[in-house]
Image (cartoon, helix red, strand yellow):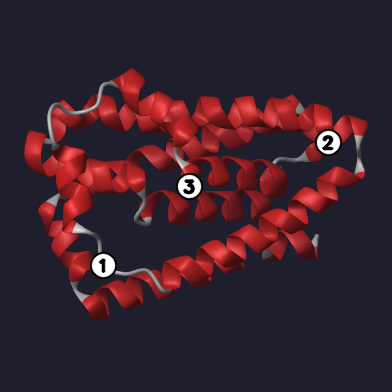
Amino acid sequence: MTLDILLSLMAFAFVSSITPGPNNVMLLASGTNFGLRRTVPHMLGIALGFGVMVIGVGAGLIQLFEVYPTSYLVMQILSALYLTYLAWKIAHAKPLSDEAGTKAAEGKPLTFLQAAAFQWVNPKALGMAITAITTFAPKELGFLGIVMVACVFSCVNLPSVTTWAVLGTQMKRFLSNPRRLRIFNIASAITLLACLYPIFAS
């Protein structure tokens, strides 16, 4: 994996992990209602559970690429389209819903296994995993390339999701401000689109 690809992967992992989504809304509410210590299993479940999902998804895709080599290019194009769509959605995102955060915080905080299992039914996480593998995993490295992507994502994902739990209501208020939310989302969208350059320039 070249340095420019690695940096782009890290940028993609950061932007996709730090921006609002089901995981972060639940962590925001959990950090606010249960505190950081009780939310740690939830955070670890997301980071490690997502890494395992990346490996599982990638292992299946490797077999597809070996049987149908052109499918790799097709998946890269589809992933680029998905990144473009995701960037557009981020740039036009609305303030977080109080109702969503309230529902996420009801009851007890998620356990490690619950948070890990949730990644497999989280549309954003599945899209991130498929995009990361098809766009950034070095095809020539095979399964090792997938493991590298999973490790990078987990390392970047953990501090990103921790931010939401630590900031809690402060982050929620920050992103509920229309002007600040607009600036944050546009900057994130531009960064996300910039991640595509090294892939198609190489």
Per the image, the residue denoted by label 3 is: 124
| Mark 3 / mark 1, whichever is N-terminal | 1
User: As drawn, is 42 to the left or to the right of 125?
Assistant: left
At numbered mark 2, what does the secondary structure look like: helix, strand or loop?
helix
Per the image, the residue denoted by label 2 is: 140
Q: What amino acid type should be assigned to the residue bearing mark 3?
A: Lys
Q: Are marks 2 and 3 in contact (CB under 8 Å)?
A: no
Q: What amino acid type should be assigned to the residue bearing mark 1?
A: Pro
- Residue 95 is marked as 1
| Mark 2 / mark 1, whichever is N-terminal | 1
Residue 183, percent across and down?
34, 77
| Mark 2 / mark 3, whichever is N-terminal | 3
Query: Of 105 and 133, which appears nearest the observer?
Result: 105
Quadrant of the image for the N terminus? Answer: top right
Residue 12, percent across and down?
53, 54
Query: Of 150 and 129, which appears nearest the observer?
Result: 129
Q: Are marks 2 and 1 in contact (CB under 8 Å)?
A: no
**Measured Cα–Cα span from mark 2 to mark 3:** 27 Å
**Measured Cα–Cα span from mark 3 to mark 1:** 18 Å
